[in-house]
């Protein structure tokens, strides 16, 4: 057996309010128009886009080194709603069903919604200092319920992969809505 080459250790500074990494290897941005399928209020979504604003909902910045088992990065979510529904990520299961993840919130507030394949749902509050443990085989979606950016650091195995298909097709069982000044978690009426 050959010994793998040693990788160089590195301290990466993560700016708590912007999620920017002092050293990063990739990034992507998701705008509202790319996420149309996940919001229930199609009229509100079309109106926002027709009015010329196709806001950035979130940005993901990653630090990934070939030859390592783990990698990490940040997700930076803007505040806002589509109709009553707070800005959220697509949500996914990991393609590798035995691989979990952690989400450590650096700034802002939100809700991490999770569900198992057989329909158990959970919510974990996201706020600075909370490290959410996402066990293997729980679908996970983050929702910015605050008025500031929600910045969290995630870390998982590079092989974990994303399985978006199931959540895109049928949605998640719970939705997180703004009702006046309240944040409410309600069953998803269009869940199939
Ligand atoms: C995160 C997510 C990131 C964006 O890095 O990929 O927050 O969410 P979606 O991928 O659901 O759009 C993660 O959970 N990686 O496994
Ligand atoms: Zn994940």
Image (cartoon, grey):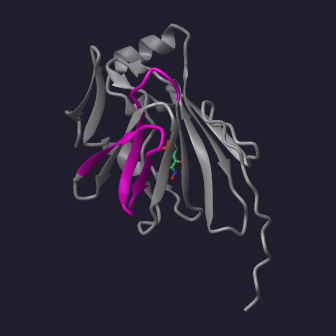
Chain part drawn in magenta: 121-149
Along the viewing direction, whichever of 148 and 51 lies nearer the viewer: 148
- Judged from this view, the residue extending furthest toward the front is 129
- Judged from this view, the residue extending furthest toward the bottom is 1
Return the x and y of residue 155 as percentages of the image width and height: 55, 55
Residue 191 image-quadrant placement: top left
Residue 135 vs 174, above or below: the answer is: below
The residue depicted at 38 percent of the width and 26 percent of the height is 86
Quadrant occupied by the C terminus: top left
Left or right of 10 on screen, residue 56: left
Residue 189 lies in the magenta stretch: no
Along the viewing direction, whichever of 49 and 150 lies nearer the viewer: 150
- Judged from this view, the residue extending furthest toward the top is 51
Return the x and y of residue 45 as percentages of the image width and height: 41, 18
The residue depicted at 52 percent of the width and 62 percent of the height is 160
Residue 71 vs 141, above or below: the answer is: below
Residue 175 vs 63, above or below: the answer is: above
Return the x and y of residue 47 as percentages of the image width and height: 43, 11
Residue 102 vs 88, above or below: the answer is: below
Quadrant occupied by the N terminus: bottom right
Left or right of 81 on screen, residue 71: right
Q: How many marks?
A: 0
Along the viewing direction, whichever of 147 and 28 lies nearer the viewer: 147
The residue depicted at 76 percent of the width and 88 percent of the height is 2
Return the x and y of residue 142 as percentages of the image width and height: 42, 39
Left or right of 187 on screen, residue 7: right
Residue 116 image-quadrant placement: bottom left
Residue 143 lies in the magenta stretch: yes
Left or right of 125 on screen, residue 185: left
């Amino acid at each position: 057996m050959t010994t793998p080459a040693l990788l160089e250790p590195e301290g990466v500074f993560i700016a708590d309010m912007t999620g920017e990494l002092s050293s990063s290897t990739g990034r992507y941005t998701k705008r509202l128009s790319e996420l149309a399928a996940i919001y229930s209020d199609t009229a509100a979504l079309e109106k926002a886009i027709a009015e010329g604003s196709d806001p950035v909902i979130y940005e993901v910045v990653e630090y990934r080194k070939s030859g390592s088992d783990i990698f990490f990065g940040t997700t930076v979510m803007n505040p806002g709603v589509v109709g009553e529904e707070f800005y959220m990520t697509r949500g996914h299961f990991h393609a590798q069903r035995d691989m979990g993840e952690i989400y450590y919130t650096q700034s802002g507030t939100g809700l991490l919604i999770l569900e198992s394949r057989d329909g158990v749902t959970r919510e974990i509050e996201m706020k600075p200092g909370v490290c959410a443990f996402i066990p293997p085989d729980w679908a996970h979606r983050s929702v910015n319920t605050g008025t500031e950016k929600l910045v969290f650091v995630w870390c998982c195995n590079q092989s974990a992969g994303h399985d978006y298909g199931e959540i895109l097709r049928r949605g998640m069982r719970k939705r997180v809505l703004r009702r006046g000044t309240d944040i409410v978690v309600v069953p998803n009426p269009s869940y199939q």
